[in-house]
Amino acid sequence: MYQIDSPIYFYFFSVIPLIILGYLFLIRWKINAQKKFSSDKILDLLSPKKSSFKPLFKLIIFLFAIAFLIIGLVNPKIGTELETVKREGIDIVFAIDVSKSMLAEDIAPNRIEKAKRLVFAILEELVSDRVGIIAYAAQAIPQLPITTDYASAKMFLKSLNTDMLSSQGTAIDAAINLGKSFFDDQDQTNRVLIIISDGEDHEELSMQSAKKADELGIKIFTLGVGTEQGAPIPIKENGVVQTYKKDKKGDVIITKRNPVILKEISSLTNARYFDGNNTQKVIDFIRDELKEIDKKEFEAKKFISFKDQFQFFLILGLAFIIIDIFVFETKTFWIQKLNLFNEKDKE
């Protein structure tokens, strides 16, 4: 197996045919110019040591030098090593509230975008932990199963929006119940569920789900987004606010962050609630909390490690350049005796 590090340098090979064309043009020009002043016999008498093959030989050496230098720049990675990698980390599932109340703009740009940015920031801090993503409103749906592929996690995060679930509401209990299914190891002690929400919820069901999660050894950290003063829920068209969501009486609904419910859910699992409006403080909080949790060794995985081979080709290229420098266009005495290229027959 092999791998190419910088394939863009392959374009440099286009220089080689240009050099060959330039060489042929130069040889033709020399021959035409010499014919104007003298014959071949006179030129042989004037330059008896001049080799007819050496110029071509020097060109071939030079072209090999260029080719090897280009391959060195491309850096082919040849020769594989099988290595065993052992990972230690924590299984973390993010449950993100995507109900319409998350559109409130009491925190810029709005609650759901803030929630997504929090998860992005936390992912940047993780190294070998496994992550999963859940989206929930009146019901919960899995977005990403447990994985170490942070790039995929970020891609799924970008797609989260408040229109992905038709049924509205904020059922934290549904998120907790679904989160429990993400942890498949019964002996696992490093189970973490991070709920990001404004806290509007049916309290009783969530408390019951939190107690069951605690029995399974799952710690539930909660991050509250929004303000306790609250804000209306905008209804936009083409990014422009048309009106605000209203209740049956026609009054504008003001949605407020409810930290009480979120605090209770966390406390039932011996975890903590934190204000999610300050991203840096959230990162520091999560980092400190995860340090206190035992890490689990994941199943060892084998992967292929490619070795850089550019050094070999660069050395060859430099060697051919040195050879080209020390090869002269005159005949070599001992090679002339061997008459390898039938030069004597031409005399």
Image (cartoon, rainbow, N blue to C red):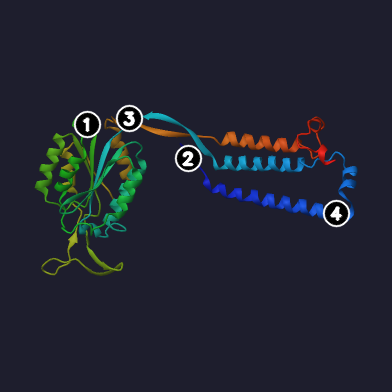
- What secondary structure is marked by label 4? helix
**Alpha carbon separation for disc pair 4 and 3:** 76 Å
Q: Could you tell which of marks 4 and 3 lies nearer the N-terminus?
A: 4
Residue 168 rendering spot, x and y as whole percentages: 16, 58
**Alpha carbon separation for disc pair 2 and 1:** 40 Å
Residue 313 rendering spot, x and y as whole percentages: 59, 36
In the displayed image of the protein, which residue is found farthest to the front?
Answer: 345
The local crowd at label 4, few if under 14, some if 14 to 19, many if 20 or more residues have their Cα within 10 Å, is few
Residue 49 rendering spot, x and y as whole percentages: 85, 38
Give amino acid for label 2: Gln
Place residue 296 in its image quadrant. top left
Is residue 256 toward the left or the right of residue 336 in the image?
A: left
Place residue 93 in its image quadrant. top left
- What secondary structure is marked by label 2? strand
Pick the front one: 339 or 8: 339
Indicate which disc residue 189 carries. 1
On the image, numbered disc 3 is attached to which residue?
300
